[in-house]
Every structure is written in C-alpha cells, then in structure tokens.
Amino acid sequence: MSRRGVLTVISGFSGAGKGTLMKKIVEKYQYGLSVSATTRTPREGEVHGREYFFLSKEEFEQMIEKKELIEWAEYVGNYYGTPKAYVEEQLAKGKDVILEIEIQGALQVRNIFPDVTLVFVTPPTAKELKERLVNRGTEDLVTIDKRMTRAIEESKFMPQYDYIVINDKLEDCVEELHQLIEKEGERQNTTNEPRKTQNYKEFIQKIQKELNV
Ligand code: 5GP
C-alpha cells in the first residue's frame, strides 16, 4: 500500500518564532507548506502567493461560502484560512504537509483530518515572548499588547495539543519537529497505536503563570 502523507499543524503564541521555524524546516526537508489566505495587509517583503494569498474581505467570504477552506478563523481583526485543494492533493501524493495556523483553526482541522498531529511551539518563557515581539518591530505597541493578551487565552488550549516544542535554539527546534513528524508518519502508516507523548502539565502551568503577571 502506498504511504499517505502526514498532516501536522503548528500553532503557538505570536512571536514564538513559528514563521522562521517553518522557513528553515522546508529549506532543509521536503515538506509541503500550505499557503494560507488572509485579509491582513502584507508586511514589508511579503509576496502574494508566497507568505499568504492576500485577499479582500469579500474574496475571503466567498471562499468560506464555497467551502474551499479546511478551516478559518478571525485573528486580531483579520481573517485567516487554509485552502483545501493543495493540502488534499499533497497528502494523497504521500507528501507530508505542515500548516502553521492559530488555535481556533488548528482545533477545527481535527474535525476534518482526525489523524492530524497538533504541535504547539512556544518560547521558553513569557518574558522572551514579549522581547521577541518587540524586537521584531513589525507591530505597534497596541498590537503587541493585543497579542500578549491573546497569548493568555491561547495558553488555555495548550493541553489539547499532542506535542509542545520549546523554541529556544532554532536549529534544535527544527530537528525536534522533523523527528517528531517522521515518528508520526511511521506510526500512522504501520501500527497506528495511540501516540506516546510526554506530560507537559508542569511547563503549561509555568508559562500560564508567567503570562498572567
Ligand atoms: P501573522 O499575521 O502574524 O502572519 O499571523 C497571525 C496568526 O494567524 C498566526 O498565529 C498564524 O499562525 C495564524 N494563521 C496563519 N495562517 C492561518 C490560517 O490559514 N488559518 C488560521 N486559522 N490561522 C492562520
């Protein structure tokens, strides 16, 4: 029987370094990286069809209506969603696909693809998260504050993820993620026994406490 591709969803606090992580992992390994649709304005250097498909609100709402999205969510005033066609094509071809999406959307994917592996990427501490957001310099202070507040809400969903990956050193994080996906592919295409994951309870409690300070 031919191998079916593995679908992995990466979420994490804004500023957790997911974008860079995704860039590195597809540079190094052969993953299909889905390009999302969004109604937010492009940041400097972002290209239509590469980082996102930048759509108007009307265009986005049409995609929802036509059921062309696997999931979609509103995030800090804008729509974000994953086009269905590309993901289905790649998985059928045996290619592993990674989606980088926020939490509301991530949890919806499981309804359509029950085998999806949900991975939550986080900096080691809340302090580091804030520093990364400030240093990125792409958002104003009001937006940074909104994203920090949202992080508190998002941290409540961390227990629903299969794996938590701490993005301390980028290279290590890339390797950890790649190995985890390889292991999932092996499991899903052979025994399909339940996942054996770590208990992340302590780490989740620690970062929740820090975020609330
Ligand atoms: P940013 O505006 O910083 O590029 O992304 C904001 C948030 O939207 C991030 O948490 C990112 O993971 C999420 N996001 C990007 N694409 C999608 C998508 O297709 N669906 C959903 N639900 N979230 C997305």
Image (cartoon, helix red, strand yellow):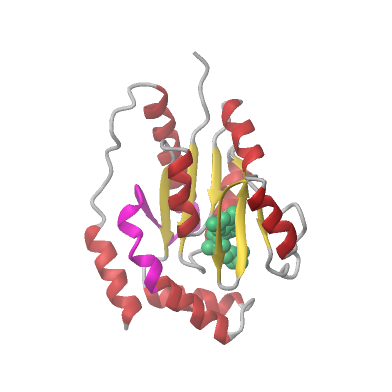
* Res. 51 visible in picture: no
Q: Is residue 209 above or below residue 191?
A: below
The residue at the point 26 percent across, 55 percent down is 200
Q: Nearer the viewer, residue 170 or 140?
A: 140
Q: Quadrant of residue 141?
A: bottom right
**Residue sticking out furthest to the front:** 65
Image coordinates for residue 210, horizontal then vertical, percent: 31, 77
What is the span of residues highlighted in magenta in the rendered image? 152-175
Image coordinates for residue 127, horizontal then vertical, percent: 40, 78
Ligand 1 image-quadrant field: bottom right
The residue at the point 53 percent across, 75 percent down is 133
Q: Quadrant of residue 67?
A: top right
Image coordinates for residue 159, horizontal then vertical, percent: 30, 56
What number of labels is visible? 0
The residue at the point 32 percent across, 80 percent down is 212
Q: Is residue 65 left or right of residue 147?
A: right
The residue at the point 30 percent across, 71 percent down is 208
Image coordinates for residue 136, horizontal then vertical, percent: 59, 74
Q: Is residue 111 left or right of residue 156?
A: right
Q: Nearer the viewer, residue 65 or 82?
A: 65
Q: Quadrant of the C terminus?
A: bottom left
